[in-house]
Amino acid sequence: MAANPQQSPAGDDRNLVTIDENYLAPTLEDRLQIFWSKHSGKVWALTGIVSAVLVGRYAFESYAAYRERQVQADYAAAATTAQLQAFVQSHPSAILAGVAQLRLADEAYAAGNYFAAREAYTAAAPLLADNALAARARLGAAFAPLQTGDTAAAKPALEALANDTTLARAYRAEAAYHLAVVAHEAGQNADATRWIELVTTVEPQGAWANRANQLRESIPAVSAPTPVSAGTSPAATPAAAEPSSVTFPGKQ
C-alpha cells in the first residue's frame, strides 16, 4: 500500500502578518526593525561622514603639531642675525617670527641703527599681539624715533601706550615718563607735569615714579601772574631753564 503524501496538520490556518508602520501593535524590536529597514542607508552614510570628519580633524591637528615642532626647531637653530632674518622669511606669520623680529630690533637698537630698529619693532608688534612681548615691541617702536630726534613720530605712539589701560603698569609709566621728559625739554612744563602725575598715579611705588618725582623738582612752579598797574611795563619773562637730557632704553 502506497504511503500517503504528508499533509499539513488539520486546522493550521495561520496567516502571515507583515511587520511595517501599519502594524497595530509593534513591539520595540519590531519598531527597530522597521526603522532599520527604512533608514539603514542613511545611518551608514552618516556614520561614514562623521568618521571622515573625525579622521580629518585628527590628521589636521597632527600636522599642525608637527609644523609647530618644526617651527620651534628652526627658531632654536637661528643664532646669528642672518639666520634670524631667514627664519622670519620662512615663517612670516608665526609667533616666533615676532620674537625673532624683536631680537633683530634689539640688535639694531644696541648698534645705533634706530631706523632699522623701528622697522623691526613695528613688524614684531602685530605678530606678538596676544603675547606679553607685544608691549615691549610697541615701546621700542616708539623709543627708536626719539633717538633720532623725531619726536613728531614718537609722541603719538608713546601717548597711545601711556593711555592704554590694558597694558602692564610699568609699561604705561615708562611711556608717560618719557613723554614728560620730552615736554619738559620743549618748555611745555604744564604737559610735563600732567605726564608726571600719570606716572605717579599708575605706578606710585615704581622706579619710573621715582624718576618722575626727580624730574618734577627740576620744573619751576608756575605762579599766578602779578597784576600790572597802569603805566607800568610788565616784568620781563625769565629765561627758560636748560633742558635736561632724556633717558632712553638701553641708556638708563
Image (tube, rainbow, N blue to C red):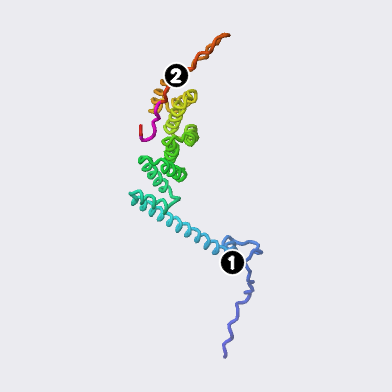
Query: Which element type, helix, strand or loop, lies under badge 2?
Result: loop
Q: Tell me if 28 is positioned left or right of 243 in this view.
A: right
Q: Tell me if 24 is positioned left or right of 79 in this view.
A: right
Q: Quadrant of residue 145?
A: top left
Query: Which element type, helix, strand or loop, lies under badge 1?
Result: helix
* Residue identifier under label 2: 220
Q: Tell me if 78 is positioned left or right of 52 in this view.
A: left
| Position of residue 227 measured from the top left corner of the image (x, y, whole percent) | 55, 11
| Position of residue 103 measured from the top left corner of the image (x, y, whole percent) | 37, 44
Q: Is residue 248 magenta?
A: yes
- Residue 164 versus residue 65: which sits nearer the camera? 164
- Residue 3 versus residue 148: which sits nearer the camera? 148
| Residue displayed at 45% across by 43% down | 122
Q: Is residue 246 above or below residue 42?
A: above
The N terminus sits in image quarter = bottom right
Residue 37's disc is: 1
Cα gap from disc 1 to disc 2, whole angstroms: 94 Å
Amino acid residing under circle 2: Pro
Residue 132's disc is: none
Amino acid residing under circle 1: Ser
Q: Quadrant of residue 113?
A: top left
Q: Give the residues drawn in magenta, as a range.
A: 244-250
Q: Label 1: how many residues lie within 10 Å, few (<14), some (14-19) or many (20+)?
A: few
